[in-house]
Amino acid sequence: MAVPTLLLISVIVFALIRLIPGDPALLMLGDMADPQSLADMRSSLGLDHSVVTQYLIWIKSVLSGDLGVSISSRQPVLDLLVERFSVSATVVLVAVLLATLLAVPVGLLAAWKQNSAMDLGLVVTATLLLSVPSFWLGLLLLYVFGIQLGWLPVIGYVGFGSDPMKALTYVVLPIVTLTLVEFGAIARMARASTIEVLRLEYIAHARAKGLSEGAVLWKHALRNAFAPTWTLIGLILGNLLGGIAVLETVFTLPGIGRLMVDAIFSRDYPVLQGCLLLITCIYVLVNLLVDLLYPLFDPRVKL
Amino acid sequence: MNLKTPALPGVAAIPPRRRRRYPPLNALIGGGLLAALVLLALLGVVWTPYDPLKLDLLSRLHAPNAVHWLGTDEFGRDVFSRLIIGARTSLWISLLSVSVAVVCGTLIGMLAGYLRGWTDRILMMLNDALLAFPGILMALGIMAIVGASQYGIVLALGIAYTPSVVRVVRGSVLSLRELEFIEASRVIGNSELYTMFRHITPNCLAPLCVLATSMFGWALLSESALSFLGLGVPPPAATWGSMLSASRTYISNAPWLGIFPGIFISLTLLAINLFGDALRDRLDPRMRK
C-alpha cells in the first residue's frame, strides 16, 4: 500500500510546484535576467520537455538521491535536507517520547480513579494544554526562562556536533514546549481508552482471580489501552514535522520547517519540493511502521 | 456483566439514552465562550474602542492602562481594538475554510460512495494520497502557490481539509445505502438524486458536524500559525497570529503584545475543544455511555 501512495505523493508534490503561476526560470532569476540565462535555466530545469517527461526525469533523479541544487545557497538539496532534518527530528522525537512516558501512566491512573479529583485535574490540565498553540507557549517559556530569569539563550543555535552541552541549552525549551502540548493530547487519549478497557470482562476476570490492582492496571489494562494511543503517536509525529516551522521560528532553530518557509519566501523551489517530499514520505513511513508494530500491543490485530 | 439483546437483522439497535435535564458542563462553557467570541467579532464590525489601524507614534508601546486597556503596539495602535478586528478575521477565515472543505468534501464523498466502482477507487486513491500530507504542510505548499492573502489561506486550508471530509462522508454513504429505508425510497420511485439529498445527506450530518467542529479548531490554529510565519493575511490587517509574530521583536520590553493575542487564540481553541467534546458525546453513538 505504501509504494503507490508514495508515488502519488511524488506526483502531487511535482504538480504543486508546477502549479506555481509564471515562468519558474523567470521567478528564480528575477526580472533583470537576460534572455540567454533564462533559456539556460529553462533547459537546466527541463522545462522544454512535456510535463510527463519532466516528471519522469525528476522522479528518476529523486530515486537516485539527486534532489537538485538549492537556488539561493547552491548547495545540493539532499545535503540541506539531511542537515536540517536531523535538528527537527531530534526535537520532535525526544518531545514525543517524553510526552508519551509522562502522559500514558498519568492517563492510566486518571482512568483508574475516574471522576476523582486527580482525574478531574488531569482532564482540565490536558484540555487546557491541548488548547494552547505551541508557538505561544514557546514564546511564554522563552520570555520567562530566557529573558526574565536569563537561564537559557534566547536566540541562536549550536549543533550537537560542536558543543553538546551548549546545544542542549538551545533545544531544551523547544522540547519542553512540544512535550507539554502533546502531553495533553496523549493523556486524554490514554485516559479515554483505559476507561473503555477497564469496563471489559477480562479485567473483571483478572480482578476476580485475585490479582492486585497494580497488576491488573499495569499488566492487563495498559497493553490494550496503549494501542489507540500508539496510533495517535504516529499521527502526532507526522503533524509535528509538518507544523514544526512555527516552533523553529520562535526558537530560531535551523530545522526543516524553517528551511521550507525560507524556501517559500525566497522562491527556492527545489528546496521546497524536497522538504514537501521528505516530510510527507516520513509521515507515510512512520504511520506504516506504527501499523506494523500495532500487533505488539494488541494481539487481536493481525496484519 | 453486560448482557445485550442481539439486534434484529436490519434493525439498528437503539442505544438507551440517559435523559439529562441540563446540557453538560463542557457544552455550556464551550458554547458560552464561543458565543462571547462571536459577539466580540461582530461587535468589531460596528465598533472598536479605537481605530485599529490608526498610528499614534506618541503613545508607542504603552503598557495596559485605563486609556488603552490592553496597551498599545510599536506603532501606538490600540491592542484591544486590533484583537477585536483580529477575532473577526480569524473566525471568518476558519469558518470559510471549513465551509469550503465541507462542501467540496461532501460532494466528492457522496459521488464516490454512491457511484462506487472505478470512480470510487480512483477518487479514493487520490484522496488517500492527499490525506498522507500533514494538513498544515499541505496548506504551506498551497500558500506557496497562491501567495499570502486572506482568500489564499481559505483556499489552502479548504483544500487541505477536504480529504478528511471525503473519507467521513463516503464511509457514511457506503453504510447508509445498504439500509432498508434507502431501498424503500428507491422502490417507491424516488430518483437517485432525490434519495441522495433527501435521505442520505441528512444522515451523514452527525459525523460531519463532529468533524467540522474539530476542523474549525485546526483551521483557526493553522491560520494563526501561517500568519505567524508571515504567510497569512498581509499587514497592516490585524490577525491574532500576525500580532503574535510582530510581538517577538518587543518581547523583552512589551510582553503584553504577545500575551493577549495568545490568550485569545487559546480561549477560542479551548471553547472549540470543549464544544467539540460535548458534540461528539452527544452525536457519536459509540461514545454514548
Image (cartoon, grey):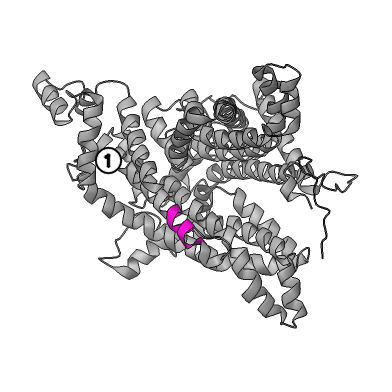
For the residue carrying disc 1, how many other residues have a C-alpha within 10 Å: few (<14), some (14-19), or many (20+)? many
- Residue A176 showing in the rendered view: yes
Residue A226: % across, % down: 59, 64
Report the residue at 67% width, 38% height from top: B207
Report the residue at 65% width, 53% height from top: A128
Q: Main secondary structure of the magenta part?
A: helix
Q: Amino acid at mark 1?
A: Val
Residue A200: % across, % down: 73, 65
Which residue is tagged 1? A271
Residue A246: % across, % down: 44, 45
Verify whether residue B87 appears in magenta: no
- Residue A150 showing in the rendered view: no
Q: Quadrant of residue B148?
A: top left
Report the residue at 65% width, 21% height from top: B45
Magenta stretch in the rendered image: A287-294
Most foreground residue, A285 or A262: A285
Q: Quadrant of residue A174?
A: bottom left
Most foreground residue, A272 or B125: B125
Query: Mark 1 — on which chain does it sit?
Result: A
Most foreground residue, B257 or B201: B201
